[in-house]
Image (cartoon, grey):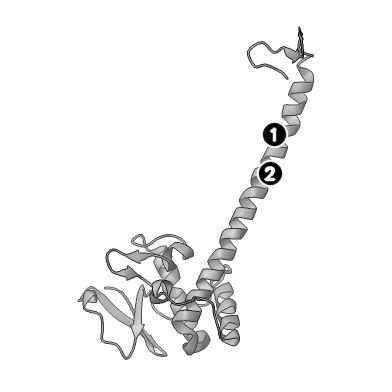
Amino acid sequence: METRETGETRMPGRLRPAPVAAPIMAARIVAAPLVAVLLVTWAYGTARAQDAESLRMMALDLYHEARSEGREGMVAVGWVVLNRIADPAYPDDVVAVVTQKKPGQGCEWGWWCDGRPDRPTEADMWALAQDVAADLLGGAPPPDPTGGALWFHETFRDRPAWMGDQVRRTATIGRHHFYARN
């Protein structure tokens, strides 16, 4: 075992001089690229895990918010998530946007904290939600049909009072009205 202070190697019961520094330097030269490879591999694995979780959360959001609306409705709801990620008033990743809570009011996305199981039960709609999520997060998403919307609600509900005059309706897609800032 080498000690940093003296550079000596301790053997049980005796002290002997450290070997020439060349092997230590060679080990450091070999170790540096190995450490870099390990760090890149760890970061890539972490990014892939985050990407997998982002895909899962986006798909769950599309499934719960728009499964009755088909692909077009899911794309629209997905764009609300993407628009929020791009907006400085909201978190900057899918998971944080979908799980965000409103101060003193519960969750931004009702399904997230409604107390019911989140596991999809309609296999065909879950498959569609996963496909749409992959399209939205895959690098070249379909065009935004919502006109930059940050909010939406079902068409049978009244416009929420908190919206006031600060937002404008940008689209109605299926059974949802979509809104952006004025």
Task: Please tell me which residue lies in front, 172 or 107.
Answer: 107
What amino acid is labelled 1 in the image? Answer: Ala
The residue that appears at 55% across and 84% down in the rendered structure is 121
- Residue 93 is labelled as none
Q: Position of residue 29 (x, y in %)?
A: 73, 29
The one nearer the camera, 136 or 52, is 52
Q: Is residue 154 left or right of residue 20?
A: left
Mark number displayed over residue 32: 1
Nearest-to-viewer mark from 1 and 2: 2
Q: Earlier in the sequence, mark 1 or mark 2?
A: 1
Q: Quadrant of residue 90?
A: bottom left
Q: Is residue 42 above or below residue 14?
A: below
Quadrant of the snapshot with the N terminus = top right
Badge 2 marks a residue whose secondary structure is: helix
C-alpha gap between disc 1 and disc 2: 10 Å
Callout 1 crowding tier (Cα within 10 Å): few <14, some 14–19, many ≥20: few
Q: Which residue is mark 2?
A: 38
Residue 60 point in image, percent of width and height: 51, 75
Question: Which quadrant would residue 3 be assigned to in this image?
Answer: top right
Q: Is residue 144 visible?
A: no
Residue depicted at x 41% and y 69%: 83
Label 1: element kind: helix
Query: Residue visible at 66% across and 10% down?
Result: 6
Which of these two is toward me, 26 or 57? 57
Q: In the picture provided, is 92 more to the left or to the right than 133?
A: left
Task: Identify which residue is drawn at 51% across, 72% down.
Answer: 58
Q: Is 19 situated above or below 57?
A: above
Amino acid under disc 2: Leu
